[in-house]
Image (spheres, grey):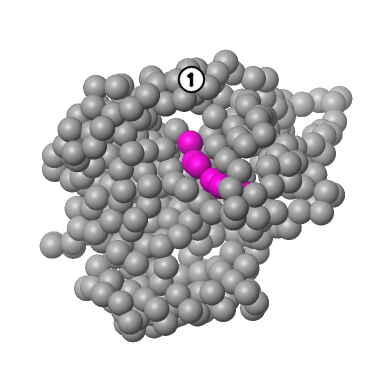
Amino acid sequence: MIDRHDPHTDLHSEQGAVRGEHPGRARNPIVKAHDLAWLEFQKPDLERAELFARAFGFTTSLRTQDELHLRGTDPGSPCVLIRRGPRSRFVGPAFKAADSKDVLRLADATGRTMAALPESIGGVAVDLVDPSGLQVRVVADMHVLPGLPTQQPLTFNVGHEVARVNATQRPPREPAKVQRLGHVVLQTTRYLETLNWYLEHLGLIVSDFLYHQGQRERGPVMSFIRCDRGSTPTDHHTLAMTLGPANRYVHSAYQVPDLDSLAAGGQHLLDRGYRRSWGIGRHIQGSQIFDYWRDPDGFLVEHFTDGDLFDCTLEPGWAPMAASGLAQWGPPATKDFLGMTPGREALRELRAVIGALREDNEFDLHRLRGLMKAFNS
């Protein structure tokens, strides 16, 4: 007898949606974004930023006095743009549209204007603002940077299947070569409104919803969202969004070839005095093997490999939010990763909580209790 049990079901979600819950997609989105194009940051010290970037595994594709473009080995656009500014801040994401017609369609629908991008990048863009106040660019027809050599996967002896004889494994302790930008995670005080905006404007679809334990009837508080390219599989999440006391960047993730390059690259970062935030482990939602680091400006960045790919047919999973549910294996989530390390950041988060509870948004006392329960679970 054939076992038709799908092991994916047990890890992807606790159970599917029940009647009346969010469907995880818009019926008639304006356009369907194909991918993340890049992330834009502002930093005061580009020399320090570039030094970390090289250790992390990026390649510099453009360097001027006031601008730094970082790329992976995959062909395409740079995946991180950094401009010199008075303070460190996340400016916003840029999503790649199918073509310039979609950019124009989005501009017309939102009352915005399509404009040419700088010649160093090429193409066109429309600048939007999501309900959290974040600048969101949608771009198309950029110059395509040629692919670069990447690290080659090792040959493995898996169990009794022998593929390597009279040869050793010696992965070099060197930067893990970033292949591409994978996803960005954002926190918002207006989670549902912002989620719906991305589904309706960019045609993104939800892979997984998380809810606070004991509060499922109040709706989800986090979503892992992918691009809808029909039958073409895409990353489990290109954007993840969570309800919290402040509108802010949480982290961004960059694909590397395999576990050995990720682990050896981590040793390379440690050797140079950089700080690991959390890792190495394997997530549940998305299944990625992960390793999180803090850059010199305090931004959380992730190396990942072996992530899930879904096509448009898979419906959203639903599961309770819990710190213990962040990984299948690996060390427990750290206070640094959860944003609970005592010090300046914790005080800033406390002030954000107090401010959010006084304002008209989706973050209330019930949500605060649910969040604290999740962090301590």
Q: Is residue 260 left or right of residue 182?
A: right
Q: Residue at x 24, y 59 (%)?
A: 193
Q: Which residue is mark 1?
A: 119
Q: Which residues are magenta?
A: 38-43
Q: Nearer the viewer, residue 23 or 114?
A: 114
Q: Residue at x 25, y 46 (%)?
A: 199
User: Where on the picture, by quarter, is residue 243?
Assistant: bottom left
| SS at badge 1 | loop
Q: Nearer the viewer, residue 122 or 14?
A: 122
Task: Note whether residue 224 is visible.
Answer: no
Residue 93 at x, y percent in the picture? 43, 43
Q: Is residue 117 magenta?
A: no
Residue 55 at x, y percent in the picture? 75, 41
**In the picture shown, does residue 179 fall above or below 336?**
above
Q: Magenta region, mostly helix, strand or loop?
A: strand
Q: Is residue 41 magenta?
A: yes
Q: What amino acid is labelled 1 in the image?
A: Glu
Residue 147 at x, y percent in the picture? 59, 18
Location of the N terminus (image quadrant) = top left
Q: Residue at x 31, y 48 (%)?
A: 129
